[in-house]
Each structure stands twice: as C-alpha cells, then as structure tokens.
Amino acid sequence: MNDTAYAAFHRASIEAPETFWGREAARIDWHVPYERVLAYEAPPFRQWFAGGHTNLCHNAVDRHLANRADQPALVYVSSETGAEQVYSYRMLYEEVARFAAILQAQGVKKGDRVLIYMPMLPEAVFAMLATVRLGAVHSVVFGGFASASLAARIEDAAPVVMVTADAGVRGSRVIPYKPLVDEALRLAGTRAPARVIVVNRGLAEAPMMKPGRDLDYATLRQAHLDDRAAVEWVESSHPSYILYTSGTTGKPKGVERDTGGYAVALAASMEYIYGGRPGECFFSTSDIGWVVGHSYIVYGPLIAGMSTLVYEGLPTRPDPGIWWQLVERYRVTVMFSAPTAVRVLRKQDPDWLHRHDLSSLRALFLAGEPLDEPTARWIADELGVPVIDNYWQTETGWPMLTLCRGVADLPVKYGSPGLPVYGYDVRLFDERTGEEVGPGQKGVIGVLPPLPPGCMSTVWGQDQRFLDTYFSLFPDRLVYSSFDWGIRDEDGYFTILGRTDDVINVAGHRLGTREIEEAVSSHGAIAEVAVVGVADTLKGQVPQAFAVVRDASVLADPASRARLEAEVMAQVAAQLGAIANPARVYFVSQLPKTRSGKVLRRSIQALAEGRDPGDLTTLDDPAGLDQIRQALSDVA
Ligand code: ATP
Ligand code: MG
C-alpha cells in the first residue's frame, strides 16, 4: 500500500514536473516570483524557476532571523584542536554578512569567483555563504589537495579572491596550507587571484604573507566589525558554485550549480528524504570539499532551519566513541556519513556505540560508495535505527536513488539504495543496443532529461563538454549517463554494480565489480575488498580481489592464508558461479582510496596489469598503492 503511495508521488513528479516543482518552490523565499517553473527550449539545458530572483544565503540564514535568531545554526567541534563553539542564526548572520562585506571590499561582485581552500572551520562555511550572498560563485577545493590539483582548479575558475588558512590538521598531524597555496598561485600564473585572505589558526609556523596580496582575516574582521553586506538577489539560474567531481575515474569535471533550483531541491529533500525538522540538529561527517558537504553540511540543513554540526577530526580520535558523544551532546536527529567511515568503526570495539545516549537519532544515511550488506546490517543493529543508502553524484547534487521515507514507509533492502527519487526518471539501458532492460538485467543507469532541480546546469564554462560527457550515451537520443552500472529487481529496487569503466568481461560474461566484492565481503573474515578486471589472454579478463582482513592474525602463516583464499573463492563460486571467481585473492592491510573515500580501482587495475597507475592527484594515502604493489610482487 505504501509503495503505491510512493509510486504515485514519483509518477506525478515525472508526468507533471511543473506542477510538482511549482508546489515545492514555495519552500523558499523568492524576491521576485518566477515566470515559468521550467524553461526547456534547448534540451538538455534547462532553467528551473525562470525569471525568479532569490539568494541561497538569504534562504539559509537571513530568512530564519525572524523566528530562530537565538536557535543554534552552526555547531563547530574540532577534536583536533579542542575548539567547540555554537553559533546562533543571529551570530551566523553577523559573521556571514561581515565576511561578505570583507569580500566586497576586496572587489568581489556578482558573478566573480571566490576559491575556498580550507579545513573544516566555521570560517569556511562563512566564506561559502558570504560568496553566494554577493551573487558571487564559490569553488571549494578540498583542503590538503596538493598544489598541482589546486592550481588546476584555480586556472579553471580564475577566482578574484581566495580564502585559505595557515593549516589543516588530521590525526594531530599539522598540514601547513600556505606553502601549498603559494606554490599553486605561482603555477596558476595570470589566472591566480589578486587577493588571498588567510585565516590564521596559529597551528603552523607564522605563514609567509606576501604584501599587497595576502591579507590576515582577523585584521580584516576587526576593520570591518560593523560592516554588513546586503543580499544580492540573483536570477534563479545564476550559478551559485562550481565543484569538481572526486576524480575517481580520471580528470575531475567542474560541475556548475544554479541557485533557485538547488535551493528548492535541497529544501524538499530535507523533508522527503531525511525527515529533518526545523530546530533539530543534523550531523554530516563529510567535508565541505565534497558535494555532501555542500548540500548536507551547509545548505540543506540551514535552508531547513536546522542546526548543522561541523566536525573537524577523525571518527576514531580521541576515541572511537567521538561521533556518538556528539550525537548525545547535541541531540542529533539525522546523521549522514559514508560506508568507508562505518567500516573503520566496525574494526573497533562495538562497545563504543553503547556508551552514549543515542535516543535522539532517527536515521543514518550513507552515500559515496556501495554499501555492502554486512556493513549496513552491522551499523543498523548497533544503532537500532534505519540505515538508508543514498546513491548520487557530484553532478546531481542530491540523491537520485534512495528510499524517500518522508513520503512513504518503504522497506529497506540491504545492498540496494532503493528506488528512483521523485524528479528523476531513472532507466537502465543496454549500452550496446540502446534498449531499455527489464528487471534482473544489467544496464547503465541513465536519467531521461530534463534533469530535476538541483542537478548540474553545465560544466563550468564548457557547455559542449557537458553535452559530450553526459549526453552522448546514444547518438539519437538525449539520456543523461551516470557512468554507473546497475540492476533492478521486481519491486523496482536498484543495486549498483560498479562503474561502467570497471565492468569485467570474462569470456563474454559481463560482471560488475560490486557483485564480486559483495560476495567476497560476505565472508566473515573480510573487512573490505576491491575487485578489478585484469587482462587475460585466454578469457579476455579475469577478476582479481584485493582484500583487507578484519583480523590480521588469520594471515600469520602461508597455510592459513592459502586456506582463507580458497574459502573466499569457494564462497564467490557458490554465490555467483565459477565465472565470477577471482583468479587470485590478495591480502592487503589497506586499499588505495581517493580523498573522498572511494576505492581507486582504475589504479589497482593498472598496477595488476603492469601499467602506470595513472593520475594520482586525488589519492589519499600512497601507502594504499604500495600495499597493492607489494602484494603483487610477493607472488610474482
Ligand atoms: P569522477 O566522476 O571524477 O571519476 P567520482 O565519480 O568518484 O569522480 P563523485 O561525484 O564524488 O565523484 O561520486 C559519485 C559516484 O560515487 C557515483 O557515480 C557512484 O559510482 C559512487 N556512489 C555514490 N553513492 C553510491 C552508493 N550509494 N552506492 C554505490 N555507489 C555510489
Ligand atoms: Mg563520477
């Protein structure tokens, strides 16, 4: 009964998008009402709420001053520095409007870009909100990216001002930012900004400040103490930000987001997907450098009048109970994290989850990587709340597949993110024939345009690249390609099988990396695994698995190692058939991941085939790759 309620809701959003989204638009303030809900004269380019004027910062901050001025808006906790501060909406307004005045004094105006390269600090959030307040466009670059990665993003956006800090800190290790920034600015040459605002936390050695270019934030703040910049109303399609994809499959793409459509999409998602209510606390453990941070640390919770918990630190320090301690202290009701972080916690003593009062928590949402059943089941059992998988991309800005439990009480099926979200006409295609495939058949996950509000408008400054990258799946039809492979069951629930680039072709059978990974990780001894297809003269490709064990002592001697490898293989053969059986199972203590926590399968595959690992700018810890090299050479 409930699933039909959701099906009807979804169908209405697809069949009459203008009626559907016109109703949702009332969730935000419009300075000038829009003329048309959807302008779609040049598909796949579209404009949501054409002619309307609004502002993201107004909707996230100013709008709440009337009723929630003294309510917490931003709760900042750093387990690295011990800092802890609660900003009410009034305080947030003051900081943001002042920061905007500072940017204005440095020449920032509507349409200009501001590059934000910051650790998890309240000032990073102030800078984002201040930028959109002025109708300027932010480009947040994950703090700690090497200078070459930063320089490439500076060159692409040509910012007028950059905002940075003296240093970031991770696991007590201080990472000085300023030298990285100086080098990036040098590399960016004429595209480098004229002004760099530095938030000095006093963590690194006093940063070298270049006179005329570098400005100390505390000094500016003092000088502008009483200044407040007004909101600049912008047309709904005006860009709010640029954000680069994580770079898991290669060169990151500069995703451009609009203003009005994004605000409406986020506002609706807070109710229909997250069930977050005004006045409550939302805790997303992501980083502002990623799309989850943009949508669900900064804009979503604030637009909804919630307080957002901004956390700097690891999930395991000072102890593996830190997240739960924060949930208790701030009465967090909705939490958002990533499977990779949950796997880290799963290696710890589960007792850490039971030392705190978690009664406020209603649900945990996870996104970013496939959520395997054992991980999902473990955390759901430990927390005693629903654990909901969200499938989406930097490009979409908000979930594309999940269970919208704010609409209907849909049952969770572990291993599946669920159903197409309202607004998304999701289909599965056989990419060779272009035909849609039915339940039980594998295909590329595509979306029929128009993409709903909140999804990317284009690739920054490169409309043609937007078309060529995302809409060239078929020559004769416009379909947005997700570049992910999936399958759907009879109830319409999707399972993500991996990236289309990673599909393994064994003797004519096509297998998703995810299918084999799920089978491997269902063995109790395995904590985490990556499967890649490796070229094979006989079969075309064979799967190879790189597994992290839960307890390293099982690998103590070669005999038990061989026994485990045989057990894992037998398990895969039993679940998926011999065709999917990995040719080898290598044991490592760590997998190479991007800084956003995604497994770099393309680099593992390259090493396994004796090739160069390729672009490593988004690699987190080089030790992960060394482990793969080591494992391969041990047997060679
Ligand atoms: P690039 O596009 O530059 O290679 P990326 O795809 O890793 O980088 P993101 O936009 O951060 O950059 O990640 C989106 C991708 O993450 C999805 O396309 C999908 O492959 C994966 N993903 C996200 N959420 C899930 C999920 N719930 N289940 C499975 N995979 C997911
Ligand atoms: Mg991608």
Image (cartoon, grey):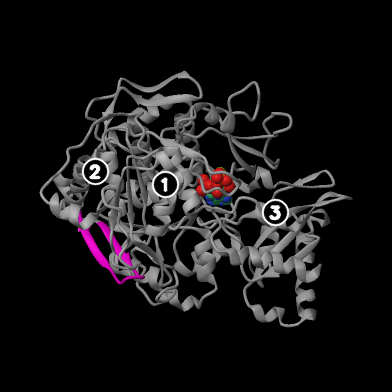
Depicted 629 relative to depicted 148: above or below:
below
Q: Position of residue 605 (x, y in %)?
A: 71, 54
- Residue 151, compared with residue 363, is above or below; it is above
Q: Which SS class for mark 3? A: loop
Seen from the viewer's position, the closer of residues 184 and 601 is: 184
Prevalent SS, magenta region: strand
Residue drawn at point x = 45 percent, y = 49 percent: 150
Say what secondary structure mark 2 lies in: helix
Mark 2 lies on residue: 103
Q: Which residues are magenta?
A: 74-88
Is 21 within the magenta?
no
Closer to us: mark 1 or mark 2?
A: 2
Residue sitting at x 35%, y 59%? 120
Res 258 → quadrant: top left
Q: Which mark is residue 273?
A: 1
Q: Foreground: 441 or 546?
A: 546
What amino acid type should be assigned to the residue bearing mark 3? Asp
- Whole-number angstrom distance, CA of label 3 to CA of label 1: 42 Å
Query: Residue at horizontal 54%, vertical 30%?
Result: 465
Question: From the image, which quarter does the C terminus lie in?
Answer: bottom right
Q: Amino acid at mark 2?
A: Leu
Tag 1 secondary structure? loop
Can residue 96 be seen from the camera position used here? yes
Tell me what residue is drawn at x 26 percent, y 34 percent: 109
Does mark 1 have its CB less than 8 Å from ligand 1?
no
